[in-house]
Image (cartoon, coloured by chain):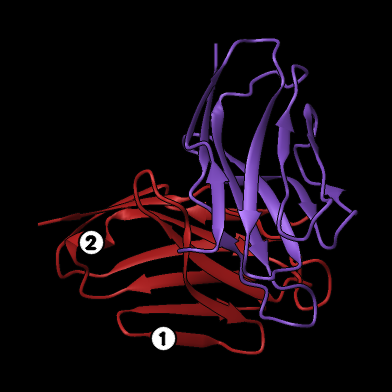
Chain colours: A red, B purple
Amino acid sequence: GENVEQHPSTLSVQEGDSAVIKCTYSDSASNYFPWYKQELGKRPQLIIDIRSNVGEKKDQRIAVTLNKTAKHFSLHITETQPEDSAVYFCAASIAPVGDYKLSFGAGTTVTVRA
Amino acid sequence: DGGITQSPKYLFRKEGQNVTLSCEQNLNHDAMYWYRQDPGQGLRLIYYSQIVNDFQKGDIAEGYSVSREKKESFPLTVTSAQKNPTAFYLCASSINVGRGRGEQYFGPGTRLTVT
């Protein structure tokens, strides 16, 4: 099955700086890569996703890049703010074919220092 | 955030007892999923269901059981056979194959403590 590795496990950044989280996946058939943000005690929420026919996608201060050849994708958060502090999870799946089953990375705890 | 509900938010049980966690959605989603979350680990898939009256084992199904008698409901039973049941349990749902991008929406979770 799919194996997703996520690095780093913790990340501390100064407010205003950028944060980058990287994930690798093992199944070359994977073609859907969402990122979830989970605040303490809350449910994971989808913040951005990308499909394998796209190399980069942006949404305001967040962006995701995908390198299919190397089988890795990354989340970039620019101009970080205290509300960006949370645990971030990457995931991969084979969609729209298959059953949309997601394989998750272990998560990155991001702390934004004021 | 609305549309997927889980109850209760906190659940305490004695070792050896079965316990059922509720998950309901009114999003008209076809597929539903159960995940387990432990500290420092990602979400691990327990069971999932793409249509009513059908479900498949995920990566860590041992000691758990599910049913999908209605599209809106996907209850999870943690049986006494589950060796380490204390965890945060998350339910999710998604539009099924061919009808959506594949994004999953999560419920608020149930924190189960077994002593």
The residue lying at 82 percent from left, 50 percent from top is B68
User: Subunit of mark 2?
Assistant: A
Residue A45: x, y in percent? 46, 63
Q: CA distance from mark 1 to mark 2?
A: 19 Å
The residue lying at 76 percent from left, 72 percent from top is B96
Q: Secondary structure at mark 2?
A: helix
Q: Quadrant of residue B93?
A: bottom right
Q: Quadrant of the N terminus of chain A?
A: bottom right
Amino acid type of the residue that numbered disc 2 sits on in the rendered structure: Glu
| Picture layout, residue B63 above or below residue B96 | above
**Which residue, given by chain and number where applicable, does mark 1 sit on?**
A58
Residue A13: x, y in percent? 21, 58
**Mark 1 or 2, closer to the camera:** 2
Q: Quadrant of the C terminus of chain A?
A: bottom left
Tell me the tag on residue B24: none
| Picture layout, residue B14 above or below residue B91 | above
The outermost residue toward the right is: B53
Residue A104: x, y in percent? 61, 54
Amino acid type of the residue that numbered disc 1 sits on in the rendered structure: Lys
The residue lying at 33 percent from left, 54 percent from top is A86
Q: Quadrant of residue A63?
A: bottom left
Counting residues from the start of the chain, the first of labels 1 and 2 encountered is: 1
User: Subunit of mark 1?
Assistant: A
**Which residue, given by chain and number where applicable, does mark 2 sit on?**
A83
Residue B94: x, y in percent? 67, 67
Residues packed near mark 2 inside 10 Å, few (<14), some (14 to 19) or many (20 plus): few
Q: Quadrant of residue B37?
A: top right
